[in-house]
Image (tube, grey):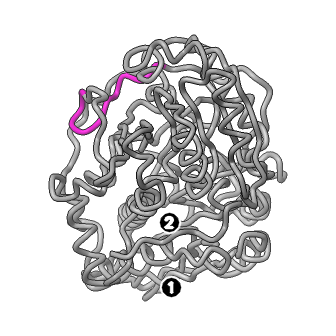
Amino acid sequence: MKSKIFPAVLLATALVATGCSSRGGTEAAATPTASVPTNFDLKGICQAGTTSSAPAQGVTATEIKVGTFSDVGFTKNSEFVDAAKVFTSWCNDAGGINGRKLVSTTRDSKLMEVRQRMLEACDADFALVGGGSAFDALGVRDRLNCLLPDFPAQVVMAANVGSDLQVKQTAGASYAPYTGYQHWLLKEAYPTSASSVGIIIGDSPVTKGLNDQYKESLTSLGATVTYFELYPAQGVSDWTSYAQAIKKAGVKGLVFLGDFLSLSKLEQVLTSIGYKLDWIDTNSNAYGPAFIQLAGPSLAFQNNLADLSGVFPVENASANPATKQVVDLFAKYAPGAQVTLPVLRAMSAWLLFAKSAASCGDALTRSCVYAAARKETAWSGRGLTAPVDLTAPDAPQKCFNVEKATATGWQPADFKPDTGAYRCDAPVLKLTGTYDKPLTLADVGKSMSDLK
């Protein structure tokens, strides 16, 4: 499949902010023990049926209207739109939700039109499913005010990460999502790197506060941050000064929060001056074939790693029936579209919504679908991800999995998985600094009793 290189550096920077937070304790999270289904199937979820009522906005006797947010008009990246098309086509071919057909409307926020699209969703949609926007905080107050449930594939800004009426599948706002990964880097795989860690961040409103959060998380694990720098979100023409500064600071491990095009250019300069780091955290935004192509010869010199936060890797789809099924579904319903990490999260979000909606029967209301999703104690998207307890809106990330970029593509790193493809012993470090908080129903003068 042809890979996509995003033209929007700012958006790429934004996307890595998903669920970022920090921690300060050292309690070990429990390892999930529930069995995880391995087939991404629709059994008991999408099927024919007879419904006769119209119990909520967007729900009729024959249809369920939902919205899918995307910045596709700005980025030209259609992954959330593709996932919506594939899942709804598949589900509707199987009979829909108890006979009701799923109808997804793309809410194209075009980067800065989040609020306009949210107001439109508030007027028409039953719920939001399987999407995400870089500046998602711009619409969260309106979403809560109109009591619109959200089953996102991706959340980005602090005001939206873990906001009320949202069922997300990543770490809660009070916890750093990457501490299992960071613990492995600093305590096991490359312990000498802890003496000098660098952080470089694309300078955009979305990344506000990330530096302090990462510093808190890394230092709590014994790292000394010796280098920090912001780079212009629109890109840098010459990365030489940055590479020289990293070398001068003696950085051994580098956290890069930004777009993978900029990272590839920085690595080319680091490699050309002969400076090799113990590791570079590319962030999961780089996970895909485009970064492999862009980084080129640097991949043989630098050690590029990414935490997928418990999503089964795409390149090993044949080894996991659920992931393989998504690949096959894309081949059938969206031939030529690429299966990416956000796509897998989106498909899991769609399945969660569909299962929850199906359990409500004819009386499909927002309160019912939200409550049903919150009952899932070990949600895995039927094998797409490591199990996550959705009963607690604010909980730490238990499982992680690490990928390494090589000249032949991405492949699992030697991170010592203990639960299938994942490692689920991440230490729990709770956020102690002062950071922006997710918005609540109380912030808009409402409560859960208002949800019908």
Left or right position of 34 against 444: left
Residue at the spot of label 2 = 130
Classified by dominant secondary structure, the portion drawn in magenta counts as loop
Q: Is residue 335 above or below residue 348?
A: below
- Disc 2 is placed on an element classified as loop
Residue 369 place in picture, x, y as percent: 48, 60
Say which of 374 and 41 sits in front: 41
Say which of 244 and 93 sits in front: 244
In the image, what residue type sits under mark 2?
Gly
Magenta range is 418-427
Residue at the image position 33 percent from the left and 54 percent from the top: 381
Residue 42 place in picture, x, y as percent: 24, 68
Q: Is residue 419 magenta?
A: yes
Q: Is residue 301 above or below residue 137?
A: above
Residue at the spot of label 1 = 60
Residue at the image position 64 percent from the left and 15 percent from the top: 224
In the image, what residue type sits under mark 1?
Thr
